[in-house]
């Protein structure tokens, strides 16, 4: 329990420092919270089921030239997945990997209220949880990568002054020896500070 509290305090401090420094120089600053539908492959002999995870943090858009902007930030992201043995649905495991994500994307603003972006995410693994039943009880996530760099494609739109939505598709790679082809579709509510 103590470790979880320490990570929460660390995330809070990192969020505060990033918010202050980003808000000072960013053309746009957004606080975001939302949900994502995470899927992936459990490897040979396993079926996988998608799970809903969450994401929260902040992003900033920095002017480059005209409508072109650099979009980055700091997001706390959960990437869960359920795997089952192909031979027995009674044996399953829920795997939840959490990350600090730093998006490194280029955004093209169509108007002040919307734009599309693409790039990569530098995602650093914070924690891995494994909860199994049946013959998968007592297992662990083996050789989880400490950093992954999934591709992201998305669009952000304001539907009211100071409020908007960010929708995205993320396609990663392997996150461990047995967890492969991670991908997600998500939507975040944004509070925008211009």
Image (tube, rainbow, N blue to C red):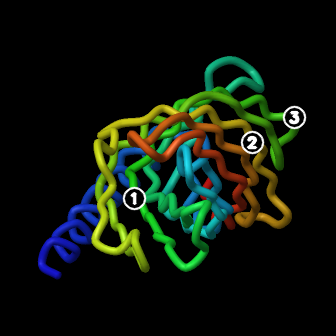
Relative placement, left or right, of 53 versus 18 is right
Q: Which residue is mark 1?
A: 98
C-alpha distance separating marks 1 and 2: 21 Å
Relative placement, left or right, of 128 versus 163 is left
Q: Check whether the beta carbons of the residues at disc 3 and disc 1 lie within 8 A of each other.
A: no
Q: Nearer the viewer, mark 2 or mark 3?
A: 2
Relative placement, left or right, of 154 versus 10 is right
Who comes first in sequence, dot 3 or dot 1? 1
Q: SS of the residue at dot 2?
A: strand
Kindly identify the residue that appears in the image at 36 percent across and 45 percent down: 21
Q: Which residue is mark 2?
A: 154
Q: Quadrant of the N terminus?
A: bottom left
Q: Neighbour class for label 3 at 10 Å: few (<14), some, many (≥20)?
A: few
Q: In this rendering, is residue 92 above or below 155? A: below
Who comes first in sequence, dot 2 or dot 3? 3
Q: Pinpoint residue 85: horizontal percent, then vertical percent.
A: 55, 63
Depth check: give the residue in front, 188 or 115: 188
Asked whether residue 190 appears in the rendered view, the answer is: no
Q: Nearer the viewer, mark 1 or mark 2?
A: 1
Q: Which residue is mark 3?
A: 110
Q: Pinpoint residue 84: horizontal percent, then vertical percent.
A: 56, 66
């Amino acid at each position: 329990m103590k470790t979880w509290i320490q990570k929460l305090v660390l995330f809070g401090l990192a969020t505060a420092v990033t918010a202050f420094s980003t808000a000072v120089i960013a053309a746009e600053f957004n606080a975001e919270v939302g949900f994502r539908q995470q899927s992936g492959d459990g490897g040979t002999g396993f079926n996988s089921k998608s799970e809903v995870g969450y994401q929260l943090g902040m992003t900033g858009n920095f002017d480059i030239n005209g409508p072109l902007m650099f979009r980055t930030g700091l997001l706390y992201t959960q990437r869960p997945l359920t795997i089952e043995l192909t031979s027995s649905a009674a044996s399953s495991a829920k795997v939840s990997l959490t990350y600090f994500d730093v998006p490194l994307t280029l955004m093209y603003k169509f108007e002040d209220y919307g734009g599309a972006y693409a790039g990569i995410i530098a995602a650093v693994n914070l924690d891995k949880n494994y909860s199994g039943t049946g013959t998968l009880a007592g297992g662990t996530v083996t050789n989880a990568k400490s950093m992954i760099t999934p591709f992201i494609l998305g669009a952000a739109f304001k539907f009211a002054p100071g409020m908007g939505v960010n929708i995205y598709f993320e396609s990663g790679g392997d996150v461990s020896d047995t967890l492969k082809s991670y991908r997600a579709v998500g939507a975040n509510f944004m509070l925008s500070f211009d």
